[in-house]
Image (cartoon, grey):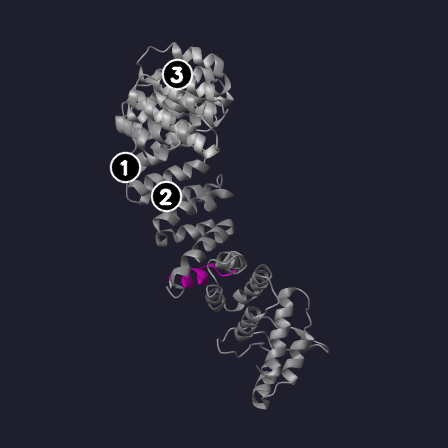
Amino acid sequence: MKPGHQKIVTHLVCLVAGVCVAGAIRSAAVEQHDDPAESGERVGRRSDPSGHDGDASGKSGGTQQTPGNRREAPLGSKDFRDAWDAIARRTDLTSRERAAMQRKLLEQWAMIDLQSAMTAALEGNWDGDDGGVNSLVPAFRAAFLKNPMEAWSIIQSGDLGLGSALFRWQWVTAVSSENPLLVLSCFDDFSDNLKKAALWPLLERRSTDPAVTEAILRMLRDRPADALTKTLAAEFYKQVKPDGTPAELAAKIATAATEQEKIIALQAFTASLKGQESGLVGSLIGNLPPEFRGDIVRQLLAASGNEKPTDLLDLAIASGNWDILKDPMVAGVEGKVAEYARRRDPIAIAEWGLSLPDRPETQEVYRRAITGYIDRYPVEARDWIMSIPAGDWRRERALMEYSQNALWYKKNQEGAAWAIERITDPKMKGTAINWRIEWAQRNGVKLK
C-alpha cells in the first residue's frame, strides 16, 4: 500500500477506534502521496468548492477543515474499504474489539455508500463468537432512517443474496420507529413471516396512533380472507385495545359486510375476552358457530396467563372439539394447570382433574393437575388417591405420579414403593417399576 493511502487508513482506523481524530493527517496524506499525477488530481479535487470526491464509486463523505481553514478532500468509499480491510488484518484485536471497530466504521461508511457498506458487512463470519454478521447489522440503523427507500431498494435488488433477510428485519425495526406508514407501504413486499413479525415494531410506539392503526386495518380489509389475514388481525389486537365491550364486539361479527371484516371482528372480540371470567366467555360465545367457538377457546388457551386455565379447558371440553388440545398453539397448557395449582389451590385443581374424561388428549392434563397436591401435601394425597374407586384410570395414574414425585423430588423410596404396590394394572405397574430402576441407576442409588 502506498504511504499516502497508508496514512488515510491509519487515520480511519484510529478514528473508528476512538483514539485519534487528527484531521491534519488527511492533508498530510495528500501532500505526501507517491504518485504526482494522482496527488495533483486529489489536490485539484480538494480545492473544488463543491467538495466532491472522485473515488471509483462516485460516492463521497463529509469534508474536514485543515489548519489554516483550507478545505481538504472528503473521505470516499474506497477510503472506507481500505480501512475495513486494515481492521481485518489487525492481529492485536480480540473478536469483540474488531467487531466494535467494524460497527463504528460501517455507521460512517453507510452514510456515503450504503450498498458497499452492506456488502462489506456480509463478508464476515456469520457464526462468529462476537455475534458475526448479526452484530454488525445494527450499525445501519441511522443510514436506514436517513435513506429508507434507497436502503429498501438495495435490500430488494437481490444483490445481497441471503444477507437481504438480515437487513430486512433491521430496516423494518429502524424505519418503523419514525415512519411506520412508509413501512406499511412496502408491506406487500414482505414474506408471510416478516408480515407477522413486522406488526410488533410498527405498533410498539404507535398502538394508540389513529393514523397507524387505521392504515393497518385498511391493509387487512384489502387482503384476501385467508389464514394469514386472521393471524395478522390476531397480532394486531395483541397490541391494540379493541374498541368496544365484549358484547358489542360479538355483535359486530354477525353484522360484518365482508369476510375480511368478519375476520377482523372475530379477532377483536377474542382479544376482548382475555382475562374475562369463564362464565361470561361461555355465554358470549354460546351463540356463535361451533368453528368460531373452538377457534376462540384455542386462542384464549394459547394466551392464558395468570387466569385460571381450567375454566378455559372446561369450555374446550364442553365444545367436544378435542383437536384443540392437540393444536401446537395450545401446547403447554397442562404446564399452566400445574403452575396454577402450585401457586393457588392444589387441592381444588386436583379435584377438578377428577372430572376429566378418559381420553388421550386429557391424560397429561390430569397428571399435571394432581402434581401440585401430591408435591405439597404428600401424606394427605395418599388418602385422597385411595378414595378414588379401585381400578379407575385416575387412581392408577395418580399412583404412578406419586411414585415419580417421591423418587425424583423427594428421594423417598418408601413413598414410591407404597404407590407402586397399589397399582393394579400390570402394564402400568411394570412401567412404574422400570422408572424406579432408571432413577436408581441415574442417581447411583441401591434400591431398597
Amino acid identity at mark 3:
Trp
- Residue highlighted by disc 2: 218
Amino acid identity at mark 1:
Glu
Question: Can residue 48 be seen in this snapshot?
Answer: no
Q: Is residue 8 left or right of residue 435?
A: right
Q: Nearer the viewer, mark 2 or mark 1?
A: 1
**Magenta residue span:** 146-156
Q: In this view, does 376 lie above or below 1?
A: above
Mark closer to the chain start, 3 or 1: 1
Residue 151 inside the magenta-drawn segment: yes
- Residue highlighted by disc 3: 352
Mark closer to the chain start, 2 or 1: 2
- Residue positioned most to the right: 68
Q: Which of marks 3 and 2 is in front?
A: 3
What is the distance, in whole Å, between disc 3 and disc 1 at their CAs? 39 Å
What is the distance, in whole Å, between disc 2 and disc 1 at their CAs? 14 Å
> Picture coordinates of residue 187 (x, y %)?
38, 51
Numbered disc 3: secondary structure: helix
Q: In this view, does 52 lie above or below 192?
A: below
Q: Magenta: predominant secondary structure element?
A: helix
Numbered disc 1: secondary structure: helix
Checking the image for residue 388, the label placed there is none
10 Å neighbourhood of mark 1: few (<14), some, or many (≥20)? some
